[in-house]
Image (cartoon, rainbow, N blue to C red):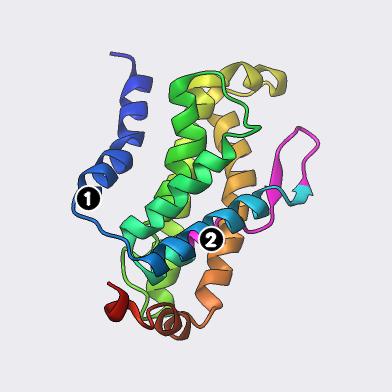
Amino acid sequence: MNANYIYVALCFIPLVLYLIKLRNFKLNVKKMVVIAMFSGLSFILSKIVFIQYPQGGSINLLSSLPILLIGLIYGPVEGMTTGLITGVLGLFGGYIIHPVQLFLDFIIPPMILGLSGMFGSDSRAKVFFGCLIVVFLKCCVHVVSGVVFFASYAEQFNMGPWLYSIVYNFSCAGVEGFLSLIVATILPLEKIKREANKGYKASA
C-alpha cells in the first residue's frame, strides 16, 4: 500500500472522533451564537493578509486565534465545531482539486485547532503546549495535502515533495498559528472563561 494513503487516513482520525462525540453533544443558544461569531471572525481574519510571500504563500492575521479560544473556553467539541464552520466558509473561493484535498486543506485543519484545551486552561503552560500541539498537527495535515496533491510545485524549487510542503506550510500556516497561540497564551483566559460561561446552567 502506498504510504501516502496511510498518511491521508491518519488525517481523518480527528474527524471520525468528532462525529462519534457529536452524537451525545448538546448546544445551548448562547454557545451557538458564540460559535457562529467566532467562526465568522476566523474566516474574516483569514482574508486579511499580514505578510505576502513572493512564491504565493502568505501569513494572515491570527485566523487560528478564535478557534483556539473556543477550544480553551468551552471544550473540544465546541472548538472543533467552530473549526468545521470556519472551514466550510473557507470553501467559498477556495482552491479545490479533489474531494479528499477539500477535507485536508479546508475542513480537518481548522477542526484540529478546536482541541486546543486538551491539557486544560488553568495555567499558561497548559494553554501554550495544548495550542502548540494542535497548531503543529494542523500544519502536518496541510503538509500531507501538499505532498499528495501539489507535489508538482516542488520541482520549481528543486526540492522534494516532502521538504517543499513542510517549508511552505510551516512558513505560512505554522507562523500564523504560532502567533495566534502566543496571543492565546497571554490573554486572561480564566476571566474570559467566567464571562463566557455566565448563565450557562440557567440556559442549558
Residue at figure coordinates x 60%, y 30% from the top left: 164
- Which quarter of the picture shows residue 6? top left
- Residue position for label 2: 38
Looking at numbered disc 1 in the image, what kind of residue is underneath it? Lys
Residue at figure coordinates x 18%, y 53% from the top left: 24
Is 122 part of what is drawn in magenta?
no
Looking at numbered disc 2 in the image, what kind of residue is underneath it? Phe
Q: Residue furthest top?
A: 1
Instruction: Give the x, y percent position of residue 95.
Output: 62, 27
Instruction: Give the x, y percent position of residue 163.
Output: 56, 31
- Which quarter of the picture shows residue 71? bottom left
- Residue position for label 1: 21
In the rendered view, would you say 10 is above or below 148? below
Residue at figure coordinates x 66%, y 55% from the top left: 45
The N terminus: image quadrant? top left
- Pick the residue in front: 5 or 90: 90
Q: Which residue lies furthest to the right in this view?
A: 54
**Label 1 – label 2 distance at C-alpha:** 21 Å
Helix, strand or loop status at disc 1: helix
In the rendered view, would you say 115 is above or below 69? above
115 with respect to 48 (left or right): left
Residue at figure coordinates x 52%, y 70% from the top left: 184
Helix, strand or loop status at disc 2: helix
95 with respect to 28 (left or right): right
